[in-house]
Image: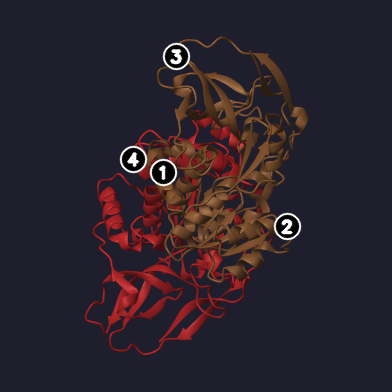
Chain colours: A brown, B red
Amino acid sequence: MTTNQIVLASRPKGIPTLSNFRNENVKMPEIKNGEILVKVIYFSVDPYMRGRMNDIQSYIEPFQIDQPIKGAAVAKVIESKSNKFKPGEVIVGMLPWSQHYICSEKEIKKIDTSIAPSSYYLGVLGMTGLTAYFGFMNICKPKSGETVVISGAAGAVGVVVGQIAKIQGCRVIGITGSDEKTNVLKDDFGFDETINYKTTKDISKAIAKICPDGVDIYFDNVGGDISDAVIANMNFQGRIALCGQISLYNTIEKPIGPRLQPILLTRSVLMQGFIISNYQSDFPEGIKQLSTWVKEGKLKFTETIELGFDQLPKALLGLFKGENTGKMIVESQMH
Amino acid sequence: MTTNQIVLASRPKGIPTLSNFRNENVKMPEIKNGEILVKVIYFSVDPYMRGRMNDIQSYIEPFQIDQPIKGAAVAKVIESKSNKFKPGEVIVGMLPWSQHYICSEKEIKKIDTSIAPSSYYLGVLGMTGLTAYFGFMNICKPKSGETVVISGAAGAVGVVVGQIAKIQGCRVIGITGSDEKTNVLKDDFGFDETINYKTTKDISKAIAKICPDGVDIYFDNVGGDISDAVIANMNFQGRIALCGQISLYNTIEKPIGPRLQPILLTRSVLMQGFIISNYQSDFPEGIKQLSTWVKEGKLKFTETIELGFDQLPKALLGLFKGENTGKMIVESQMH
């Protein structure tokens, strides 16, 4: 039996291109005792993957040249030599970009598709939802009536943070890159105000106008100029969660900008970077809360689903052009 | 009766000069019921005063043109029409730069000169000590064995933070601007290592060498390039307390530098600005702990005392040239 996989062909300098990836047809080994053969249904495509394409030691090891890209995926069990998994069951795990894969028991976890569509376990009921939940609740410590600004607001994490902020009684402003997305944020996700950064000349002034009482909480997915504009409007004892810096991921030169410490100092502002694994021991509590909100209809979700395994590299590159609203997902099989 | 006072003559652009101040001899009013006439012994001279010379609304109101500069001072009661204060008692308060001053009861607080010299109530047993104590304990949350870097280490706050860090079982590295000061830090205050930033070519490399296991805590008094160098060496889940940014106080252009959020993000670092009044309700606990350490001989202190009321402006300007070791104080009366 053979399968298709996508490997890292070369490391990008700056913006990645399709030539950094290579499609391969490879022979599958035999399935051994304790192992499970799965066929992937949905692949998660995430901004943090860009960092793993560099050969830089970070909180997560770099992808290896000629080895498959790896990420979260939802798959169906095809064959099992484990008594913990049965054919037909749906699982989630960190899997290679491969249409089929032979897993160990430890690599995968069964999911309950009665709560939500299985792809949601890559999004609102997976790392995305947990990132939004713990980053916002633990770092931003929202209080009812506070003003929250979210950059990358129409991204997978952004739409969840915005809704959690509304559940906490906050006023929520989303920054995103198209009028289509600002409409989605307001109409589908209940954001109070939005800013289209591509058509707004002075973002700092726009925020000052929309937030006459200043900004208490900034949940940052993008970094760069947009963040400078928000941080200029932070209130005394404001809180900034650093979740992503997507505007800087493809820069070749070391990015420079205004020094922010004087603002943080004189306004007693907290800025905290985080990665979701910091909260690993609290994941069950987080999933429980997120599931409850989803079941209650308080937490909605949206996905941009690209069809076909071969679309994986293009979908990843699309994240840096803002092609997604909500979670970017690739569905392995064409319909 | 007349007295001498020093007023803000004009607002500095960039580095302040003596011409921004003016000495005046003024007539004192009569002392009324409930008031106390004091003669100042020691004036505290602090970096934050530079910010108040600008006409910018901040956490503390700006000094007014033609009005006296104001700051912490220790004074002796000369005459009292309050039954709470008696002539000869020594008090501390926020007082104008004036040799004599008529206070209300609420402005001043008696001090206990049996614990430490009265000038210490401007330093280790005053705002300086509290700033070091709460900034370090509450934001940096030190754990025994951790590596702590302090910039402006030979300044009033720096020497206290260094000693508290040693009491907490940390390894302490101080950055300062002369070999004389590095010697003081090691010999008098027990710092483990020091860096003279003026004679060190690559501060980041120097820190990497001195801290082979990275930096867990950075207590920042200076900002700018020195901070960039320290932050490049921060460990995963490190903590940065922003106490001062003295290197930037006299800049005219908006300072720029490397964007630090990518480091804070990938290493889950916390950066928190603070001002000491955030901890006001805990001051009694802080003073109690600091007094205990001083009495036990665990916490030493040092001062640079300039003699003569007229030296106040010069002493303030001296802070920006690093002329002080420990607390910069002006003793009002020449001996």
Q: Chain of mark 1?
A: A
Frontmost of labels 2 and 4 is 2
Q: Amino acid at mark 1?
A: Gly
Q: How many numbered marks, from 0 up?
A: 4
Q: Amino acid at mark 4?
A: Gln
Frontmost of labels 4 and 3 is 3
Q: Which mark is residue A198?
A: 2
Badge 1 local density, few (<14 within 10 Å), some, or many (20+)?
A: many
Identify the residue position indicated by label 3 in the image. A34
* Whole-number angstrom distance, CA of label 2 to CA of label 4: 50 Å
Quadrant containing the N terminus of chain B is bottom left
Q: Amino acid at mark 2?
A: Lys
Identify the residue position indicated by label 1 in the image. A286
Q: Provide residue B178's location: percent of width, then percent of height.
A: 55, 43
Q: Provide residue B241's location: percent of width, then percent of height.
A: 47, 49
Q: From this view, report whether residue B51 is shown above or below residue B321.
A: below
